[in-house]
Amino acid sequence: MDISVKTGSILEDDADAIVLNLFEGVKTPGGATGAVDRALGGAISDLIAGGDFTGKNRETAVLYPREGTASRRVLLVGLGKQADFSLDRARQAAGVAAKRARDLGVKRLTTLVHGAGAGGLDPAQAAQAVVEGAILGTYQFTTFRTTNRDEIKTLSALTVIEADPARREALEAGVRTGRIIAEAVCTARDLSNRPGNDLTPTALANRAREIARAAEMACEVFDEEAMARIGMRTILAVSQGSEEPAQFIILEHRRGKPGQKPILFVGKGITFDSGGISLKPGDGMWDMKFDMGGAAAVVGAMEAVARLDLPIHAVGLIAASENLPGGKAIKPGDIVTSLSGKTIEIANTDAEGRLVLADALAYAKRYDPAAVIDLATLTGACIIALGHDAAGLITNDQNLADEVQAIGDATGEIVWPLPLLEGHREQIKSDYADVKNIGGRPAGTITGGAFLSHFAEGYPWVHLDIAGMARSEKDHPYTPKGGTGFGVRLLVEFARRRATQKQQGGPS
Ligand code: BES
Ligand code: ZN
Ligand code: ZN
C-alpha cells in the first residue's frame, strides 16, 4: 500500500473515499468533519439527528454525496466518548474505517488523523496510530487461497490529510514509524498463519535470514551440530522426535554506543506442538501451528528495530523446533542437562516451550544483557487466568516489569503481572534432577515462569506468556482473526524508549 501525507482540504481530495470522525454524543460536528458537513448542507448533522450515527467507538456510516466533496464516498467513523479517547482508540477507528472502505471496493483512501484535532493527541503519535490501524485492520493472509483470487480486495493507497502545513513534518515522521511497525506486525502474522508443513524450523530460519538481509541486520543460525557443540541439549531433546532439525536463530542490530549493554528478545518457536509422547488430544492440537507466536513477534520486532535504525544494540534469539512423538522422541521421566548445567526431569513432553527457552535464556547470559524479554505461547493455564485480553507477565526485576507493563498500556498490548513466590518454585522441584518441567495443575502459568527463572539468571528478565494472545478467534478493530503478531509493537516501543534513554542500564 502506498502511504503519503498531504497538506490541504479534505473537501478537495478526490480519493475513492474520505474518512471523517466524530466523538460520541456530538450533535454538531466541528473541525474537518464540520467543514464537510457544511459543504454537504448538513447531511452529517441530519444523520446524527436521525440517530443513524451516534459516534460510538467502532461505528461507521457511509454517505454518497452528489456534490460538495471531490470524493464520491464519505466514511464516518465513531471515536467513542471524548473522555475515553486514547491513541488505541485512534488506531481502532482507523482499522475499522480502512476495513469498511476496503470491503466497499475502495482502492484509494484518504483519512483525517483521528485525535489530532479535538482529541488532543500528539500529531506524530496520532498519525502513527492511524497508519498502524489502517495497515493492521486490512491485513489478510491469502497465500494458500487459489480460487476466486480476483475477489480478494485490497487498498492500494492511503493518504493522511491535514490542513495545517506546520504539522506536516510531525505527521510524516509518525506515518513512517507507523508503517514500519505495522509491516513488522504483518511479518509476524504471516509467519504465525503459515501451517506447520510449510513453516518448519528450517523455513523459519530461512525467512529470518531474508528479513535480516532486507533490513540490514546480522543473522546467524545454529544447526543441530552447532547446538550440540555449544551444549544446547534441551532444545535438541525437544527436536529429537522430529525429522525436521531444530534451528537456533540469532538476529542482531548493533547500533548502541560502545560499552552499552544490549537488550534481548527471546521467542519460543515451536512450529508445531503435538505434545510429543505426552500427546495432546485432537481438540487441543489443531491450532498448535501458532505455537511459534513468540518467535514471530521477535522476528517482527527485530525487523522494525533494524528498519527504524534505532540507536541501540538489540538481539533476538529464537529457539525453533517441532514437538512430535516418535521412536527417538524424549519420554516422560527422561533427564537432560541444559546449557546452564542444570539437570531437568522432563515429566511431561508437552511442556516443551520452557525446555527450548531454558537453553535460549542461558545463552542470553553471554551477551551480559541490560534486559531480556521472552515471549512464549507457554501455557493453556494462562488462557484460563487472563483469557484473550492480556498476556501474563512474570519477572525477576520489578523495575523492568513496571516498564514493560506501562509500554503495554501505551501500545494497547496489555500485559498483567502474576506473582512468582517461593511455593511456586517448590512445585517444580524434582526427586531425580535439579528441576522438573511441570508443577501440577495449581498456578500452571506461574510454575512455567518459575521454571524459566532457573535459567534467566544474572540479568533483569520479563517473561510474557502470550498463549491467549498470539491467535485471535474473532475479528477485532485492527486484529483480524488468526495470528495476531502480539508483542511486536510492545517490543519495538521498548527498544525505542531504551534507545532514547541516556543510560541503557534501565529506567531511572
Ligand atoms: N503450546 C502449549 C500451550 C498452549 C495451549 C498455547 C493452548 C496456546 C493454546 C504448551 O506447550 C503446552 O502444551 N503447555 C502445557 C503445559 C503442561 C503440560 C504443564 C499446557 O498448557 O497444558
Ligand atoms: Zn506443549
Ligand atoms: Zn507449546
Image (cartoon, rainbow, N blue to C red):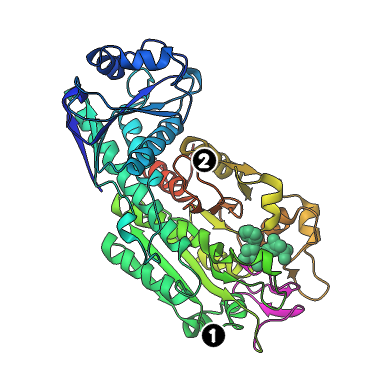
Q: Is residue 144 above or below residue 187?
A: below
User: Is 196 on the left-hand or right-hand side of 22?
Assistant: right
Question: According to the image, label 1 marks what residue?
Answer: 243
- Separation (CA) of disc 2 from disc 1: 38 Å
Residue 234 position by quadrant: bottom right
Asked if labels 1 and 2 touch by Cβ distance under 8 angstroms, the answer is no
Across and down, in percent, residue 128 comes to 33, 37
In the rendering, which numbered label is found on residue 408? 2
Across and down, in percent, residue 377 comes to 59, 59
In the current view of this chain or complex, which residue is farthest to the bottom?
327
User: Is 157 on the left-hand or right-hand side of 268?
Assistant: left
- Asked if residue 378 shows in the view, the reply is no
Q: Is residue 240 above or below residue 97?
A: below
* 373 or 487, nearer to the observer: 487
* 417 or 53, nearer to the observer: 53
Residue 424 position by quadrant: bottom right
Which amino acid, by three-letter code, is at mark 1?
Glu
Residue 215 position by quadrant: bottom left
* Prevalent SS, magenta region: loop
User: Is 167 on the left-hand or right-hand side of 433?
Assistant: left
Which amino acid, by three-letter code, is at mark 2?
Gly
Residue drawn 56% across the image and 75% down it:
322
Q: Is residue 133 magenta?
A: no
In the rendered structure, which segment of residues is drawn in magenta?
328-354
What kind of element bears circle 1? loop
In the rendering, which numbered label is found on residue 173? none
Q: Is residue 326 above or below residue 464?
A: below
Q: Is mark 1 within 8 Å of ligand 2?
A: no
Q: Is residue 335 magenta?
A: yes
